[in-house]
Image (cartoon, rainbow, N blue to C red):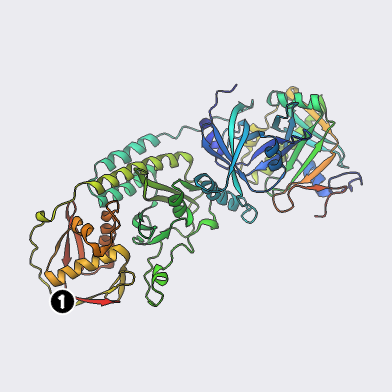
């Protein structure tokens, strides 16, 4: 595997975890400091870890998308269900575009990964397909460059900020 | 605005799938998202979230109380977004202890037992519930028959006329109507503030007489906090490895005699539910059920058990306060015909423990009662007794009229039966009973 570029906040292990497709939860805030939250239908990360994209359903995330458009701010937590390995990334300049047919293979790969990941904690494929039952024309892609990242694996180090290249495993 | 009520999405709050929550930093408007291991139903307008770590979520809600919580239905895969406002944190009491027990189950199930510790119960007001659009799977079939099961239990309890029958009927109704095969009823001893087992079903030994301290394990916590305590996954945190201690050692360290009746419960329970039995605001005891399987008791089972425990409490209370027989009604004792070897009854005054031919029988108030009965029998030839005279006897030290004397007598009767001794007690009417002795007795009093 390629080593992360020295500018990435995420370790190669974190990048690999996000790249394979794990739970991704997105949150935003409006001008009145009211939060919004939704689970992503898919995610991707560049090999250097410097750019992250999450896919959301418009009809599931109206307020959240308004917030991103208005503030550019976003926080996303990635977590591997079985191991509870968790990392959160935040950015202040996220951009939104409609999902395109070229995104479809990636979205399908993500759903297949989630079927595997959630089967390991006891959920069957039918359940997981219902969770991730998207229509391409309802999806948007939100891309951003992580500006801060936090290790949020439950335990004593939870919440510690990651610096360039990630913390030691 | 969604029409969904919190009650209608309760399956999402059973801890099967962790929830996620977004909060916002009041100072810079930066959002934060974090996993929440436990979302607990408080009432139709409130949920409580487990506060386990001093983290960003904690800092955010203390500065800006608004939060957005995403939960997932464990069967239909529907998402619901709860808009919340933080109100307060509780660190003791029924809500905290109920959550602590449930979290212990969740933690051990998810392999997080060493990490999860409940620092507090964060209580939030539910401002609104969003039904998130999606491809929901069909609703699970409504669990029919729960109300019918409750009716079945209620009808059978209503026909009972004595405590013994009432307790047996409670346990057999749970087996017949709810498919619950391991259950017990414990009563509170108001003097020692401990719970003693008076009836059980489904165990290798009945465990009648086994004691549990207030606050100890699922049963003790349900009693102390007067709240249902429910665990859906096996947890070592609430096993009774240390629960049953010999109180004799504490009461009279000089006596090297074993007065411990082993706790009868399952050695590896995976689901447990303890419900306090209350009446007129007082704790009478605990109704406890368990299973060797995970996920056996849902919030609906809890609802049924609480209703059954309410009926049980009221019935016990009524029987307790019903008029007791007067001494005048007592009939003359039948002449006892005795044969066979003498039975030695030893009484240790230090803790009122009784040993029959060297084998432990009972202690405490029930032991003192037994000693009075056999003493009156040996000295005066009496075999007929009334609850009333026991209550009026200052030597027995019964606390007051609220003491459940019937439960103590039932405990004594069942211990004598299990002991197989040639001494038995038998109920002869409301508030009356008979001592049946088949061998000559030798009484030995030990200081």
Residue B299 point in image, percent of width and height: 48, 40
Residue depicted at 88% across the width and 47% down the height: A164
Q: Which quadrant is home to the N terminus of chain B?
A: top right
For the residue pair B273 and B134, the one nearer the viewer reads as: B273
For the residue pair B322 and A127, the one nearer the viewer reads as: B322
Q: Quadrant of residue A75?
A: top right
A148 over B426 or under it: above or below: above
Q: Please identify the residue farthest to the right as the structure is shown.
A: A6
For the residue pair B171 and B84, the one nearer the viewer reads as: B84
A63 over B197 or under it: above or below: above
**Mark 1 nearby-residue class (10 Å; few <14, some 14–19, many ≥20):** few
Q: For mark 1, name the chain.
A: B
Residue B74 point in image, percent of width and height: 57, 37
The residue to which callout 1 is attached is B340
Residue depicted at 76% across the width and 37% down the height: A76
**Disc 1, SS:** loop
Residue B58 point in image, percent of width and height: 68, 42
The answer to whether residue A99 shows anywhere in this view is: no
Residue B447 point in image, percent of width and height: 30, 76
Indicate left or right for B50 with B447 as reference: right
Instruction: Please count the marks in the image.
Output: 1
For the residue pair B285 and B110, the one nearer the viewer reads as: B285
The answer to whether residue B206 shows anywhere in this view is: yes
Residue depicted at 36% across the width and 38% down the height: B149
Q: Quadrant of residue B368?
A: bottom left
Indicate left or right for B51 with B234 as reference: right
A45 over B447 or under it: above or below: above
């Amino acid at each position: 595997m390629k080593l992360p570029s020295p500018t990435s906040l995420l370790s190669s292990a974190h990048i690999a975890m996000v790249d394979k497709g794990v739970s991704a939860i997105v949150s935003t805030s409006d001008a009145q400091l009211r939060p919004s939250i939704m689970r992503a239908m898919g995610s991707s990360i560049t090999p250097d870890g410097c750019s992250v994209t999450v896919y959301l359903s418009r009809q599931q995330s109206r307020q959240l998308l308004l917030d991103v458009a208005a503030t550019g701010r976003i926080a996303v937590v990635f977590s591997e269900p079985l191991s509870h390995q968790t990392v959160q990334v935040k950015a202040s300049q996220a951009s939104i575009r409609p999902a395109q047919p070229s995104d479809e293979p990636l979205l399908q790969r993500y759903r297949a990964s989630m079927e595997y990941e959630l089967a390991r904690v006891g959920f069957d494929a039918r359940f997981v397909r219902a969770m991730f039952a998207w229509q391409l024309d309802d999806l948007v892609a939100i891309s951003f460059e992580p500006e801060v990242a936090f290790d949020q694996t439950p335990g004593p180090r939870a919440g510690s900020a990651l610096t360039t290249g990630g913390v030691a495993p | 605005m969604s029409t969904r009520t919190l009650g209608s999405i309760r399956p999402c709050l059973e801890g099967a799938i962790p929830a996620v929550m977004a909060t916002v930093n009041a100072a810079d408007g930066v959002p934060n998202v974090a996993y929440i291991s436990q979302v607990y139903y408080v009432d139709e307008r409130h949920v409580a979230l487990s506060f386990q770590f001093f983290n960003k979520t904690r800092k955010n809600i203390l500065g800006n109380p608004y939060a957005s919580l995403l939960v997932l239905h464990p069967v239909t895969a529907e998402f619901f977004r709860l808009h919340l406002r933080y109100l307060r944190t509780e660190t003791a009491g029924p809500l905290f202890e109920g959550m602590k027990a449930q979290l212990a189950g969740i933690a051990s199930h998810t392999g997080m037992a060493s990490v999860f510790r409940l620092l507090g119960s964060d209580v939030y007001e539910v401002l609104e519930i969003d039904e998130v659009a999606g491809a929901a799977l069909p609703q699970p079939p409504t669990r029919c028959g729960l109300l019918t099961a409750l009716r079945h239990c209620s009808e059978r309890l209503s026909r009972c006329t004595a405590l013994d029958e009432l307790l047996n009927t409670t346990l057999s109704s749970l087996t017949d109507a709810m498919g619950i095969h391991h259950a017990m009823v414990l009563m509170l001893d108001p003097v020692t503030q401990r719970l003693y087992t008076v009836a059980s079903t489904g165990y290798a030994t009945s465990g009648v007489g086994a004691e549990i301290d207030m606050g100890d394990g699922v049963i003790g916590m349900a009693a102390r906090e007067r709240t249902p305590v429910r665990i859906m996954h096996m947890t070592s945190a609430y096993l009774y490895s240390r629960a049953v201690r010999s109180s004799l050692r504490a009461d009279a360290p000089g006596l090297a005699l074993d007065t411990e009746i082993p706790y009868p419960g399952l050695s590896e329970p995976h689901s447990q539910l303890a419900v306090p039995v209350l009446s007129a605001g007082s704790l009478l005891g605990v109704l406890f059920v368990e299973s060797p399987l995970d996920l056996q008791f849902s919030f609906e089972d809890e609802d049924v058990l609480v209703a059954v425990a309410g009926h049980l409490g009221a019935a016990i209370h009524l029987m307790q306060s019903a008029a007791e027989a007067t001494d005048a009604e007592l009939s003359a004792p039948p002449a006892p015909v005795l044969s066979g070897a003498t039975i030695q009854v030893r009484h240790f005054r230090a803790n009122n423990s009784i040993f029959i031919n060297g084998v432990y029988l009972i202690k405490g108030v029930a032991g003192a009662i037994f000693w009075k009965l056999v003493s009156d029998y040996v000295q005066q030839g009496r075999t007929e007794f009334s609850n009333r005279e026991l209550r009026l006897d200052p030597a027995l030290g019964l606390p007051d009229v609220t003491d459940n004397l019937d439960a103590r007598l039932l405990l004594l009767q069942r211990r004598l039966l299990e002991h197989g001794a040639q001494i038995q007690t038998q109920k002869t009417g409301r508030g009356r009973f008979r001592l049946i002795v088949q061998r000559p007795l030798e009484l030995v009093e030990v200081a």
